Image (spheres, rainbow, N blue to C red):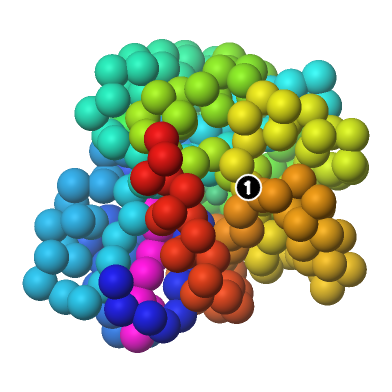
Amino acid sequence: MRRGRIDLHIHSTASDGVLTPREIVHRAVVLGLAVIALTDHDTTSGIQEAADAAASTDLTVIPGVEINSEGPWGDLHLLGFYVAPDSPLLTRRLASLQQARLHRAQGMVEKLAGLGMALEWDEVQGLARGQSVGRPHIARALLQRGYVDSVQEAFDRYIGLGGPAYVPRFRLSPLEAIETIHAAGGAAVLAHPAHSSVDEPFIRDLVALGLDGLEVYYPAHSPEEVGFLLALCERYHLLRTGGSDFHGPRSGEGGEMGSVFVPFECVEHLHQAAEAY
Ligand code: AMP
Ligand code: FE
Ligand code: FE
Ligand code: ZN
């Protein structure tokens, strides 16, 4: 593993990113990054393509995943690093999450039709080339049809939480998500903790469930939040990770690849920890 800049949170077309895994690798190489993790929502289907593309370069690609879960505290995203894509439990659980995503997206298309915004299912599916169909694909379809002027507007007016076309979807519990990541040989890290208004008792509960780390470095985290999360990592002996949550250039979501400073030692500690699973 070459030392250099790292980015441990990236989405491709396997879920709701706009670049293919191959294009992600190309961009990381052009930007001079040393290590990236591909962390698509509820799927590992982009990992092989990324690994193949990186094989002839000195970029390291960590196989990852971002599993959406829901606890008594609301929506929680758990990143899994160094997961084995062929793990039986991981494969089974991700397949049911993808199935649930599909039904839910169809439900939202129906609600939108009821609101006078007809979309063909093929349009949504054409935008969701990968395995995990999500709200960003619906937002992009609305944009293509001219029903909205931006992806953000689609979320704000229609498909954001509580919006008139919003449909909740099935999620794993945090314990199930952590177990699934561990069963696949990965380390489980809470993504963008500041989004989930994390406090200390909450982190203590997750640590009791097996949480291995916190995503400390993230575009939307203020210096105060980073300081708070670092203190929690120290107190509970947690790993630190960080990344941009890149979804593509001008995707309106996450930062540019490599734009968040993440100390290189984070990836060394992560690698050591994952070897224990
Ligand atoms: P889903 O997993 O289908 O519920 O969609 C959630 C995804 O939508 C997140 O991973 C983000 O990529 C994106 N997203 C969530 N909220 C917004 C927002 N307000 N504006 C743009 N994208 C969003
Ligand atoms: Fe996303
Ligand atoms: Fe997330
Ligand atoms: Zn993400």
- Amino acid type at image mark 1: Gly
User: Which residue sits furthest left?
Assistant: 56
x, y percent for residue 244? 56, 65
Q: Name the residue under label 1.
A: 213
Q: In this view, does 127 lie to the left or right of 103?
A: left
The one nearer the camera, 27 or 160, is 27
Q: Is residue 275 visible?
A: yes
Q: Is residue 197 above or below residue 242?
A: above
Give the image quarter of residue 126. Answer: top left
What residue is shown at x 46% (from left), y 23% (from top)?
A: 180
x, y percent for residue 128? 36, 39
What residue is shown at x 36% (from left), y 17% (from top)?
A: 89
Q: In this view, does 139 lie to the left or right of 47?
A: right
Question: How many badges with numbers are in the image?
Answer: 1
**Magenta part of the protein: which range?**
32-38
On whether ligand 3 comes within 8 Å of the CB at mark 1, the answer is no
x, y percent for residue 104? 53, 18
Binning the other alpha carbons within 10 Å of mark 1 as few (below 14), some (14 to 19) or many (20 upward) gives many
Considering the image in quadrants, where does the C terminus appear?
Answer: top left
Give the image quarter of residue 275. Answer: top left
Please check the rendered image and state whether residue 56 is part of the magenta-colored stretch, yes or no: no
Q: In this view, does 77 lie above or below 266?
A: above
What residue is shown at x 57% (from left), y 75% (from top)?
A: 263
x, y percent for residue 50? 23, 56
Q: In this view, does 204 lie to the left or right of 256?
A: right
Q: In this view, does 17 lie above or below 203?
A: below
